[in-house]
Image: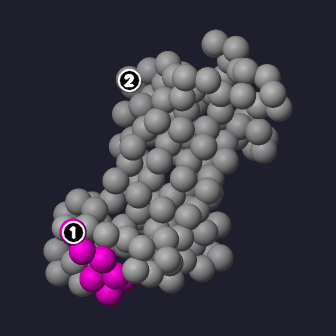
Amino acid sequence: MPFVELFVPKDSLDQERREKIGGRLVSEVMLAEGAPDTEAARSISWLVVNEIDAWFVGGRQLPAGEKPKYVVRVGVPAGSMNDDKRRDIVRRVTRVLADADEDPARFSEAATAWVHINEVPEGNWGARGEIVRIEDIAALVSAG
């Protein structure tokens, strides 16, 4: 059950690229997590796109028209990850971004895209006004 945040400079994604990334990003993270591809699992796997007005690198604002930089934050319940799954998430997220870019080779450079995996501690995820635990999530996605 990932919560994925994509950060990009404002106006750097046209609608086609936004849909190409948005249509695949959560699915790829779900695959890396080992989540079942069910309607229930998809209903709690979200992506939001944050378009940033000002993006600075090394104290210099990126000029308009420069190839975009990306930050992708993936929030998952703690205990659901291991190093292999983390590596797989980073690889899959980077591939989705590269596949949607005009210059996919630039994703081999460290300064193009960062992926942050945030493991939310047990008891710190909530929905329906209640704490949601990993076993609650597992029950929901397996029943659905």
Pointer 1 residue: 129
Where is residue 95 shown, x and y percent of the image?
Answer: 58, 47
Name the residue located 65 percent from the left edge and 33 percent from the top edge: 69
Name the residue located 27 percent from the left edge and 82 percent from the top edge: 136
Pointer 2 residue: 15
Name the residue located 37 percent from the left edge and 33 percent from the top edge: 19
- Residue projecting furthest to the bottom: 135
Amino acid identity at mark 1: Gly
Extent of the magenta region: 129-136
Q: Along the horizontal axis of the image, is 59 left or right of 85?
A: right
Foreground mark, 2 or 1?
1
User: Quarter of the image containing the C terminus?
Assistant: bottom left
Asked whether residue 95 is in view, the answer is no
Q: Earlier in the sequence, mark 2 or mark 1?
A: 2
Name the residue located 58 percent from the left edge and 62 percent from the top edge: 117
Where is residue 29 shown, x and y percent of the image?
Answer: 46, 60
Q: Provide the secondary structure element on which disc 2 rests.
A: helix
Q: Along the horizontal axis of the image, is 84 left or right of 12?
A: right
Question: Local crowd at mark 2 within 10 Å, few (<14), some, or many (≥20)?
Answer: few
Amino acid identity at mark 2: Gln
- Numbered circle sitting on residue 117: none
Is 115 situated above or below 118? above
Asked whether residue 112 is in view, the answer is yes
Q: In the depicted view, which residue is nearer to us: 64 or 20? A: 64
* Residue 143 location, quadrant: bottom left
Q: In the depicted view, which residue is nearer to us: 37 or 110? A: 110
Q: Along the horizontal axis of the image, is 90 left or right of 138?
A: right
